[in-house]
Image (spheres, rainbow, N blue to C red):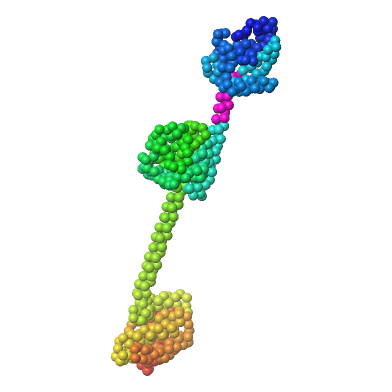
Amino acid sequence: MFYLSDKFQELFANNSLCKKFIESSPDAIVVNDASGVVLAGNTRAAELFGYIDKNTIPPNVIGSYKNEEDRGRVLDMLSRGESVQDFETEILDGKGQTFTASLSVSTMLVEDSAIHISIIRDISERKKTEVELREGEKKARLNETRFEALSSLAGMAEAELPQLYDFALEAAVRITGSEIGYIYFLNEDESELRLYAWSRKVMPQCSVESIPDAYHVADTGVWGEAIRQRRPMILNDYERCTEKKGLPAGHVPVARHMNVPIFDGGKIVLLAGVGNKDNEYGDEDVRQLSLLMEGMWNIVRRKQADEELHKAYAEMETKVEERTAELSKALAEQKVMFEEVKRLASTDSLTGANNRRFFMDRAEIELDRLSRYGGELYLMMLDIDHFKNVNDTYGHSVGDVVLKELVKCCTATLRTSDVFGRLGGEEFAALLVHGSVESAILVAERLRQAIEDLEVRSGEHVVKFTVSIGLAMVCADEDIESALRHADGCLYKAKSQGRNRVVSYCAEV
């Protein structure tokens, strides 16, 4: 025992077992009277309080309570006949240092005097562990909240960027236990801050008449230090800060403030800040806010890259489509030009009829088909009767009109399978495909009659004319020149027999 009054020495001397029981207790045991005078205590009490001998023991337990109100509550409970069990309080040891104790006090009568027996257990380590556990749980909850926020952000692939910023801003306020928050973006040279948004809770409280969209970093107060110093900044006592420039009229009051710069490729891209946490901001708040905003920026950057890729792809597609359209147009124009060249190369420039070259090429094709597959093929030659008289009488311009009208009449009268062309001057020819000698003579006669009935009007002149036609069967074993000679011979006979008639070589065969 570290101390026994004379009165208690006799009592404990008569009961050694009680003394051993008290002395072996792992908890400090202190006995005092109703006024707080210390009467006794065990060795553990001496160790806990740091008392060396009788001279170092305080005369009264009143000074052992860090908070006098705690002793008052203990005495109130005892005065009501209640026992005090595991009452937590802050206790001062002999050196004035504080430890957390669990206090259990009971009252008993000794020789008609009330004494208080206090069992004191040092729970400082337990409380420290509990605080660490709570901090760990809090940190885990914050991490979980941050991970949930980042997971939600990652899932907002289709959302617009303002939605991502709004979500991250509210999450930043929530995980730091703040009341307000903001996001500012920096320009390329980090000279200007452009406001994105304040958190939703700020806006109803803010009555600033005009909030600038942008600030020059050089003109900002303490909240711009994070940019100038390029590191997170914590201000836990805004009111006493001597570097602040103050708030505009109507601004939300600020008690505490913290902000962090977010870097991308060595440059600060945005500044995120929070304010008015109930307790002080610390390194953990900086860590949580930085990780959240860095995660958000990575998602935003990836989304921007995707959008740029889509934009570039769309632009490339547009260019490809435009180039394809240009090439298609050029090809179409080229095709038209090619067809026009072909037409010009195969068409008589005056009448629009197939020219001699085209006619002879087609005749060779039809003759080859005849020799391969058989059938019948007829060649018809026609010549305008007395065409020189037309030119001499009406002039060559009228003669040209006559030629053109002749071609129109022939094209309209002949079958679509037949091949018609101008061989030269007033001489024309037609290949009659897929027919018999009777049908060939019928076609030739029908054409002769159509031309005889034709009236060509040119100004005040009305010209009528006739044609002579020679018709010959084309044999598979002869060439086209032979067939032309046969048809031309029939044409000559038609002319010599009085013109305006059809003479057929076929009929003589």
Which residue is at 51% across, 43% downward? 201
- What range is drawn magenta here? 121-135
Asked if the stretch drawn in magenta spans residue 127, the answer is: yes
User: Which is nearer the eye, 501 or 155?
Assistant: 155
- Place of residue 388 in the rendered image (x, y in percent of width and height, measured from the top left): 31, 90
Q: Residue furthest bottom?
A: 498
Q: Quadrant of the N terminus?
A: top right
Residue 491 seen from this side: no
Using the rendered view, name the quadrant where residue 83 is placed: top right
Using the rendered view, name the quadrant where residue 421 is placed: bottom left
The vertical placement of 355 against 33, above or below, is below
User: Which is nearer the eye, 225 or 376?
Assistant: 225
Magenta segment, prevailing SS (helix, strand or loop): helix
The vertical placement of 10 against 192, above or below, is above
Residue 23 seen from this side: yes
Q: Quadrant of the C terminus?
A: bottom left
